[in-house]
Image (cartoon, rainbow, N blue to C red):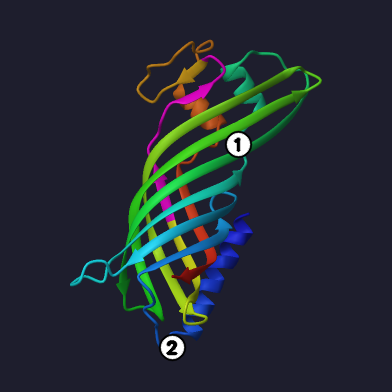
Amino acid sequence: MRSLFYIIILSLIVFTTSFSQSNYYYGPKFYGGVSIGYYGGFGIQGNGTISHFVREIPLSFRIGLGYTSIDPGRPVDARKIFINDATNGVPEKSGRVWDMRADFLYPIRLFSHSSIYAGIRYSLFTADFRFIDGNEFFTISNEEFGLGGGLETQFSISSNMYLVFSAGADYYFSGAIYGHDTSYSPDGQDVNPRNDYTFNDADNAINQPKLQPRAMIGINYGF
């Protein structure tokens, strides 16, 4: 998946360099879009934007909802920290993150039409671990708030459609990690912790969002 991240970054550089002299069409006040790319794994996002809603300031506001498939962490360590010390069974794993975001975008004079964006984030992380032939199936979950920002460039395909490139990063503040009847919290207020395990042990075993690089390609359509 990291290779996808680098490909998108390279594409952003190539396209913005090639089209840096093109005229930008400021477009409608409302538009929606879909993007795909890298966000700690393969991700897809839908978004809606209202642009130029302040008369004297060329500011836009966007909300988005995304889904990403990720590597959830280390099954054996998760089992020891949250469940038991058994080692039987063949481990399988899957992970996903639902993220919600709200950004303000401000245009800058760079490339063709570019904007910097920044805003708040909220993520819902879920990891499923299965030990086949070991009769052990459990889920680890986590929810966090964060902040993020980046750079976005878009090019007019038609009067109502735009090709969008975006790159940035999000930072999430640590939150409690839940699994079975156990939870580990950054402030040490753990519930039914196993042995001498701490939040740091759980945090190292589980790949909930932390500092997430982000690179997306998508289409926006004006209404």
Q: Quadrant of the N terminus?
A: bottom right
Task: Name the residue carrying label 1.
Answer: 72
Q: Is residue 44 left or right of residue 166?
A: right
Mark 1 lies on a secondary structure that is loop
Which percent across, then down, holds residue 155?
47, 78
Mark 2 lies on a secondary structure that is loop
Q: Which amino acid type is shown beneath numbered disc 2?
A: Ser
Structural crowding at the residue carrying mark 2, measured as other residues with C-alpha within 10 Å and reported as few (<14), some (14–19) or many (≥20): few
Task: Give the vertical position of 85 relative to 105 (above or below).
Answer: above
Which percent across, then down, holds residue 103?
35, 56
State the residue at coordinates (35%, 64%): 50
Disc 2/disc 1 C-alpha distance (Å): 43 Å
State the residue at coordinates (59%, 50%): 41
Write down the region rendered in magenta. Answer: 169-181
Judged from this view, the residue extending furthest toward the left is 56
Task: Name the residue carrying label 2.
Answer: 22
Residue placed most toward the observer, 219 or 22 = 219
Which percent across, then down, holds residue 37?
57, 59
Task: Give the vertical position of 182 relative to 205 (above or below).
Answer: above
